[in-house]
Amino acid sequence: MKKNSRLILALDVGSGDEAYSIASETEGIFDAIKVGYPLILSAGLSVIKDLSSIAPVIADLKIADIPNTNRLICDRLFSAGAQGVIAHAFTGRDSLEACVDVARRYNGELYAVAEMSHPGALEFMSPIAERLAILALDVGASGIVAPATRPERIRTLKRIAGDLTIISPGVGAQGGSLRDAIEAGADYAIVGRSVYESSSPRKAAEALLDLIR
Ligand code: BMP
């Protein structure tokens, strides 16, 4: 993923047509498009290839299974055209390593979730996030997911994660500030609803771009 706008569009919309239309309208602004269960389950895996003609696609299935199943899932996603895949790290070294191995085979990127952005993440995830970031670093992941809703956590996790790329969701609809997340060390901010629910996704995306520059 080339660092340009430092913005990733999360397209959690309900159809391939809608996704394609918003991606086209905002073409050139986002460094990548993140798709997850909502879109893949409605539009099918082929949506990855379709959107890849507009921007690199990160498949966010937060994979969390045994190594063999993780390997199979990653293989499906990369062969469908994903440039990056997001997996959970809490399943342990062997499971995460399996994802990294497949990513390497495809010259792709593997992002590990260190800490999530919602309030519930404070319950179980936040207390082990530093260990998850160390694991991501150890197994050679491309980057980690850290919460834009808690910039101080981005700062802490960045100190651990070294050169790993930090991608941060939680800007806008979840209350996180784009500027604060970037200042805290996020390499990319992930933004969904504040763009795709806007009456003008292009204008909303340009406003984010202005904020970042
Ligand atoms: P929104 O800007 O609409 O809140 O979207 C954020 C996106 O990032 C969603 O796709 C969500 O699933 C994802 N995400 C998140 O919000 N927090 C996390 O910790 C990890 C995520 O992948």
Image: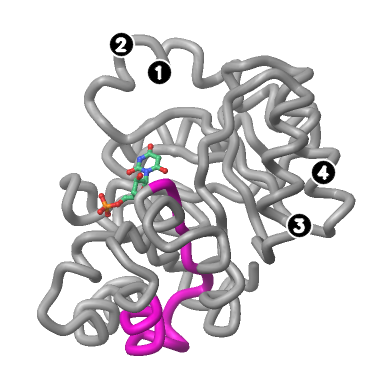
Of badges 2 and 4, the one in the foreground is 4
| Amino acid found under the numbered disc labelled 2 | Glu
Tell me if mark 4 has few (under 14), some (14-19) or many (20+) residues whose alpha carbon lies within 10 angstroms of its own.
many
Local packing at callout 2 (Cα closer than 10 Å; few below 14, some 14-19, many 20+) is few
Q: Nearer the viewer, mark 3 or mark 4?
A: 4
Ligand 1 within 8 Å of disc 3? The answer is no
Q: Amino acid at mark 4?
A: Val
Q: Give the SS element for disc 4.
A: helix
Magenta-drawn stretch contains 137: no
Residue at 36%, 85% (x, y): give it: 26
Alpha carbon distance from label 1 to label 2: 7 Å
Going by the numbered disc 3, the residue's amino acid type is Gly
Q: Which residues are magenta?
A: 20-37
| Residue annotated with mark 3 | 108
Whole-percent x, y for residue 162 in the image? 67, 39
Above-or-below relation of 25 to 11: below
Q: Nearer the viewer, mark 3 or mark 2?
A: 3
Q: What is the number of the mark on residue 126?
A: 1
- Judge the density around disc 3: few (<14), some (14-19), many (≥20) Cα neighbours within 10 Å: some
Is 33 positioned to the left or the right of 207 in the image? right
Q: Residue at x 75, y 59 (%)?
A: 79
Badge 1 amino acid: Ser
